[in-house]
Amino acid sequence: MKSIAEIKLHPNIIICDHSVDGGIASVRISSIRLAKVIFSTGCGWDHVSVSFPDRCCTWEEMCRVKDMFFREDECVVQYHPPKSQYVNNHPYVLHLWRPQNESVPMPPVWMV
């Protein structure tokens, strides 16, 4: 994940609050929409959650957020856990995750 200093440089990100390991931001994803973003780097994981008040982000919007908060060479994932482990505190939030101490397994490029 990019450092807070790098994140602050992005013209479409307004940091509302931050600490050593993350923060809260308003992010302009499109010309008219601001998303709420919570980002953190604790417990061995980089994490970004993205939400609008009335709908989920599109694939393209999540790609823009990924580019804003992560470096080009970092692979991040959106997990679909077993239903027994679902936690849904907000109906329109999506998450990006990256383990800090290991690589995310990826299929061969020709399969993606």
Image (tube, rainbow, N blue to C red):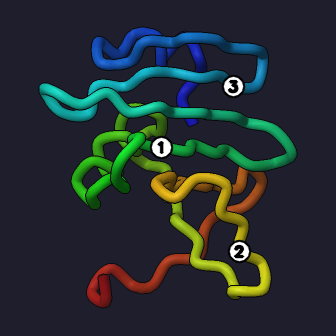
Mark before the other along the chain sequence, 3 or 1 = 3
Query: Quarter-wise, where is residue 110 in the image?
Result: bottom left
Residue at point 67% right, 44% down?
Answer: 46
Dot 3, how many residues are within 10 Å of its Cα: few (below 14), some (14-19), or many (20+)? some
Q: Can you say whether 23 is above or below 38 in the image?
A: above
Mark number, residue 97 = none
Query: Quarter-wise, where is residue 5 in the image?
Result: top right
Instruction: Name the foreground residue: 81 vs 111.
Output: 81
What residue is pinned by disc 1?
A: 50
**Amino acid at pointer 3:** Gly
What residue is pinned by disc 3?
A: 22
Instruction: Name the foreground residue: 21 vs 73.
Output: 21
Which element type, helix, strand or loop, lies under badge 1?
A: strand
What residue is pinned by disc 2?
A: 86
Q: Are marks 3 and 2 in contact (CB under 8 Å)?
A: no
Picture quarter with the C terminus = bottom left
